[in-house]
Image (cartoon, rainbow, N blue to C red):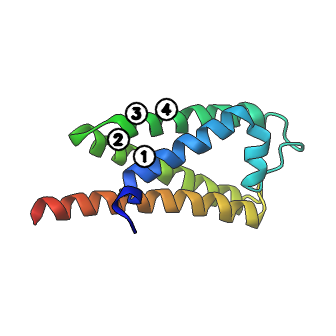
Amino acid sequence: MAAAFRMDPVTGLSVGRIVIGVGALAAPSATARVFGLDPAGNPQLDYMGRMFGARELALGAVTLVSRGALRRNLTVVGIAVDGADLANGLIELGQRNVTKLASGMLVGAAAGAMGSGVLALVQRRATKVS
């Protein structure tokens, strides 16, 4: 892969948060459908989707522009937020409030984001030790 296209995990995660956040703010119903949710069956989902979008956009943007210890700390905050999202996805699946497909997509996205954050922390620690 060319160096110009290489992206560290935190930058990739931040960009992903920004894209999802903008989508949820601009088109909350469409974004909900992408994740297997039913906005027609729950009209309040647009409201919650915009709140989610604002959070993702803010966390992604501030992490993207941060450096050093602040970037590390924001990565840890992101891991915690994604962990809460993962737990919520499992709770909703257990209560049968979402379909297995939707739960899989939501839990998978949260787990992937958590993994990306943890990978970034581990890589950073490894390069500092070397």
Q: Residue at x 26, y 37 (%)?
A: 70
Q: Residue at x 77, y 60 (%)?
A: 96
Between disc 2 and disc 3, whose residue precedes?
Answer: 3
Q: Disc 1 designates what residue?
A: 78
Q: Nearer the viewer, residue 89 or 115?
A: 115
Q: Quadrant of the N terminus?
A: bottom left
Between disc 2 and disc 4, whose residue precedes?
Answer: 4
Q: Nearer the viewer, residue 124 or 95?
A: 124
Per the model, the C-alpha gap separating discs 1 and 3 is 11 Å
Q: Looking at numbered disc 4 in the image, what kind of residue is underneath it?
A: Ala
Q: Is residue 79 visible?
A: no
Q: Nearer the viewer, mark 2 or mark 3?
A: 3
Marker disc for residue 63: none
Callout 2 environment at 10 Å: few (<14), some (14 to 19), or many (20+)? many
Please state the horizontal and vertical placement of residue 21, each as a whole percent of the image. 60, 39
Marker disc for residue 62: 3
4 and 3 marks in contact (CB < 8 Å): yes
Please state the horizontal and vertical placement of residue 32, each as a whole percent of the image. 75, 47
Decide if residue 21 is on the left or right side of residue 98: left
